[in-house]
Image (tube, helix red, strand yellow):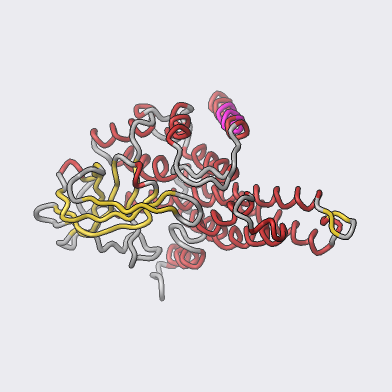
Amino acid sequence: MNAMHEEQRLFHAAVDRYLERTASNKTEAGFSASQWAQFAEMGWLGLGLPEALGGFLTLHDAMLLMEKLGAAGIKAPVMDNLILCGHLLASHGNAAQKAVCADMVQGKAMLALATAEKGSRHDWADAETTLHSGNLVLSGSKCLVACGQFCHCILVLAKETNGTGLTAVLLPIDRAGITLRHYTTYDGRDGSDVTFDRVQVLACDVVGSRGGGHAPMEQAMQRAYVALACEAAGAMRSAYTMTLEYARTRKQFGKVLTANQAYQHALVDMYVAVEEAQGLAHHASTALDASDPLAARWASGAKAFACSDGRLLGEQAVQLHGAIGMTREYAVGAFYTRLAAIANEYGDADWHLLRIRELDTGAPHGQ
């Protein structure tokens, strides 16, 4: 155990040194292939995966990495490749799909998850994309696919036409009938809408079992909720730190801003929110890594807090900076836009609070 702790300490210290050394303009948009290759070389893309696939350390270490990436304003799709697709394929994929996962760890392949649809809002299981249960033809569309233009394989969730449930399939992005429309999201990330026009699916493309895709995807989504909560905690801390430093140096009427009592109270509220967000995210991560029966509840609790208080903190950070906080070139605005995006990604605060009620009482959403 001590050896594991030492390995974890050394790894996270190396991550901190890399991020400090490569700190750049946080307002830059887009995916960097060279940066992604460095992530793979340093082992970031294998955190928590089996050693046979090139993985090491734990899922909790992957979540701590997400917090560091959030604090640094890194826009790379680590969550989508590692925490969502990678862990799902490692647990439920066949031999060929696990080989794809191993390629992802080495930086040789990029993966993308396609669950969101224009009519589903936050409910990833509300799929209108269909897989014909007889001839395995996939039809429909997905939206907000992270870094779709750079991925080699796409993991798609579709409903079986015979009503047996949801099926997950892993498809090469160049499969006939798959088309993509690319764009940049308002927080500066690469996104894509994907259309499946009678795409032929092979039996070996199915991840897990036919009609059995709901449970694996539920597990993946719990990981996503915690990952986003951790990323938000990191972004919140950086936004708070920038605001505190600004207030300590900026003078108004001959006094620094921290001499203003109202400003002091606002900074205290921000500090408390950061500590609470980090505490909830770490607890949820630990519970998930330990397969705690309450892990799903903690995952939604951490995500709900990150949604509401994260966005509020971002808004306050911009406001306390004054006019400079509104400029695109100033990093505090980039942290705010990312926190605003996280507030709607894979469920907003209200959706997760309803999900907690469902987990506690068994009452479905909306009742």
Q: In which quarter of the image is residue 89?
A: top left
The residue shown at (32%, 49%) is 216
Q: Main secondary structure of the magenta part?
A: helix
Q: In which quarter of the image is the N terminus?
A: top right
218 or 261: nearer the viewer:
261
13 inside magenta stretch: yes
Relative horizontal placement of residue 329, taking residue 170 as reference (left or right): right
Which one is in front, 15 or 295? 15
Q: Which residue lies furthest to the bottom in this view?
A: 367
Q: Does the magenta stretch include residue 153?
A: no
Give the image location of residue 190, x and y in percent: 42, 49
Q: Which residue lies furthest to the right in this view?
A: 254
85 over 195 or under it: above or below: above
Q: Give the range drawn in magenta.
A: 9-17
Say which quadrant the C terminus sits in: bottom left
Q: Tell me the residue at 84%/61% (across/down).
A: 260
Q: How many labels does the image show?
A: 0
Q: Which of 73 and 6 is in front in this view?
A: 73
Q: In the rendered view, does 229 fall on the left or right side of 259? A: left
362 relative position to 318: left or right = left
245 to the left or right of 338? right
Residue 137 drawn at (x, y percent)? 14, 53
Q: Please provide percent x and percent y for residue 176.
A: 17, 47
| Residue 363 percent across, percent down from the top left | 40, 70
Quick check: 131 above or below 105? below
In this view, which residue lies farthest toward the top?
A: 3
Residue lying at 82% horizontally and 56% vertically, measured from the top left: 257
